[in-house]
Amino acid sequence: MKNIFYTLNLFASALYLSGCASSNSLKANIDDYNFTTSYLQLPRKPLDTSYHTFSVNIETGITTVLGIKKDEIEQRIEIAGWRKLRLDAHVQIKTKFEDVIIEGSEAKEKVDIIKGKDGKDSIKNSSFYVEVTYSFASRAILTD
């Protein structure tokens, strides 16, 4: 149970990043970033199945809405075996995404060289892309 809620915050952040990143992006290096988490020891006795309901409330900043819509984030958040309600669920998930801060951008060129059968350079294919460095803050609060 605690693993579901622990990974839910990571999953929500990953969904937001996948929505903001271009579908043509080559790769994302997130090794340089860190975050802190905390967790709560849940009871060992399983809950009655009537308590297996959850609701999702998403808050976003002005620039965040340009990258991905709140409804799309709400639809992607699911807990296996639990029923999603609009309001007054047993577990309430409140997630807030702050505004995206663009720290820099740079136009880059990718050059692909295709060699011919004789080993000489025969075709040089160039493409250009924009690399954008950005940051944002997010927070998830789970209430029972």
Image: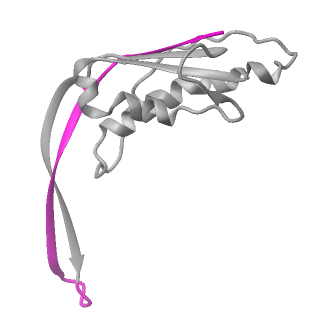
Q: Residue at x 35, y 46 (%)?
A: 27
Residue 41 in the image: above or below residue 129: above
Residue 111 vs residue 67, the one in the foreground: 67
Q: Residue at x 85, y 15 (%)?
A: 44
Residue 19: image location, x then y, percent? 35, 38
Residue 92 in the image: above or below residue 121: above
Q: Is residue 139 magenta?
A: yes
In the rendered image, is residue 46 in sight?
A: yes
Q: Which residue is drawn at 77% across and 21% down?
A: 50
In the rendered image, is residue 30 in sight?
A: no
Q: Is residue 6 left or right of residue 28?
A: right
Residue 98: image location, x then y, percent? 32, 16
Residue 31: image location, x then y, percent? 43, 32
Residue 40 vs residue 66, the one in the foreground: 66
Q: Does the magenta stretch include residue 30?
A: no
Quarter of the image with the C terminus in it: top right
Q: Is residue 104 left or right of residue 138?
A: left
Residue 81 vs residue 140, the one in the foreground: 81
Q: Which segment did they paint magenta?
A: 116-144
Quarter of the image with the N terminus in it: top right
Residue lying at the far right in this picture: please name it: 45
| Count of all numbered marks drawn on residues in the image | 0
Q: Residue at x 14, y 72 (%)?
A: 124
Display colour scheme = one colour
Residue 43: image location, x then y, percent? 81, 11
Helix, strand or loop for the magenta stretch, by majority: strand
